[in-house]
Image: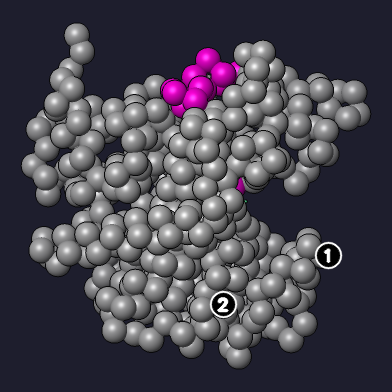
Amino acid sequence: MPPQDPWEMALQQFQVAADHLSLKRGIRECLAYPHRELVVHFPVGMDDGSVRIFTGYRVHHSPVLGPTKGGIRYSPEVRLNEVRALAMWMTWKSALMHLPFGGAKGGVTCDPRQLSPGELERLTRRYATEISILMGPKSDIPAPDVGTNAQVMAWIMDTYSMHRGYSVSSVVTGKPISIGGSVGRSDATGRGVMIAAREAARLRGMPFAGSRVAVQGFGNVGEAVARLMHAQGCRIVALSDIYGGIYAPEGLDPIAVRQHARQTGRVEGFPGTEPVSNSEVLERPCDFLIPAAIEGQITGENAARVQAAVVVEGANGPTTPEADAILAGRGVLVVPDILANAGGVTVSYFEWVQDLQSWFWSEGEINEHLERIMVSTFNRVAALAAERRVGLRTAALIAAVSRVADALTTRGIYP
Ligand code: NAD
């Protein structure tokens, strides 16, 4: 069976929340369409002297609650429908967290592992130029996602600043600290996932320390969550990256795995572990399963084989609606993406506020605010789920969609 289209998935999830809210038809239609979509085809001079054309996207799903916010993805799988879905999820995530942002996402169809640093920089600067008609600190603020990092954000910030003639640090988040990035941002998504897992354990009456954890994806999100959960006394039994995974029932030290991955380019081959495929990582015995790679990983085909008691979605859209139903039927608790991985956009909001005010906070302040917002939002979603007798995903979407729908209704339809 072909994998489910992410945009179809996002729309299906939205319609469930819209039904619960009995949204009026006009509002429902408005929110079911992305507000604005930009597709760009642009040339990049390659190291061998040739010129290659790349395709990039920037989609604004909804600017109703504020400037649009969302990451930029570099991957061979980037398609318009994937960017649309990720943009819609950003609208709901920001609304759920009560951040003054709308939702956006961008991406370039490319394999960053096949590009030299120079090619990557030229691609980034040209893409940033192409989307600069939408981008701006008061209009649309990118951040890192799969295949991009703080260095890519630095090039985007520099390109935008060169066009303006002065430095505009608040145009992107997830930047290096030396150019206006925030302390605590690089771990923020992983830290938020760890907090969400800890709160899920509390909700379930499960011990957190000593619990077994499997993490799919060992990048910005997966590496941080594995390291932070390990520091909380959890046992990391499985890890993977795009090349494959490793399994060790007695537990792994994520810092040692990171060193190994830095040296060899992959987690596979870490001494004393059994090699497993990316899909096997999802099916190994564990208490917490944390998909932290890409969408559409837990599907109708494999959901029945997931052995975890709790799935905490570090990635966006890792569980299909069909898999959601199977997991719910088996009593597996799913902490949805728009809640579980919202620590990233929350600290991105702190970064933006610090840049706009040129007043920087300490790491203690950042982590304290993040902890408070994650815990209070988790409790709000859990209470709504109990009240409406729905899963955490539907509860989170109901809270988020109703906030955006209220704002849209209050603002009215222009003209
Ligand atoms: P990343 O590029 O830093 O890491 C991605 C990891 O997943 C890598 O280990 C990579 O090898 C692996 N991977 C990539 N493609 C894969 C595939 N086809 N199959 C299996 N593994 C694959 O990306 P990231 O920033 O850690 O993002 C991971 C997920 O978390 C994405 O869904 C992203 O949208 C989501 N997310 C990221 C942030 C953030 O702050 N970076 C915030 C919220 C959500």
Residue hosting label 1 = 263
What residue do we see at 35% from left, 60% from top? Answer: 372
Tag shown at residue 188: none
Q: Residue at x 46, y 85 (%)?
A: 209
Task: Report crowding for label 1: few under 14, some 14 to 19, many 20 or more residues within 10 A (C-alpha).
Answer: few
Query: Is 185 located above or below residue 324 in the figure?
Result: above
In the rendered image, the residue lying farthest to the front is 359
SS of the residue under disc 2: helix
Mark earlier in primary sequence (1, 2): 2
Residue sitting nearer the eye, 115 or 210: 210
Position above or below: 346 against 203:
above
Tell whether position 94 is magenta: no
Outermost residue toward the bottom? 250
Query: In x, y percent, where is residue 83?
Result: 47, 36
Quadrant, the C terminus: top left
Instruction: Specify the amino acid type for callout 1.
Output: Gln
**Image height check: is 406 above or below 414?**
below
Q: Which quadrant holds residue 143?
A: top right
> Mark 2 and mark 1 in contact (Cβ < 8 Å)?
no
In the picture of the structure, the residue carrying the numbered disc 2 is: 231
Q: Is 145 in the magenta?
A: yes
Q: Residue at x 56, y 21 (%)?
A: 131
Is residue 83 visible in the rendered image? The answer is: no
Examine the image and state in which quarter residue 250 appears: bottom right
Residues in magenta, as a range: 130-146
Residue 367 x/y as whole percent: 47, 59
Decide if residue 303 is on the left or right side of residue 378. right
Q: Secondary structure at mark 1?
A: helix
Give, as a three-letter code, the residue at label 2.
Ala
Q: CA–CA distance between discs 1 and 2?
A: 23 Å
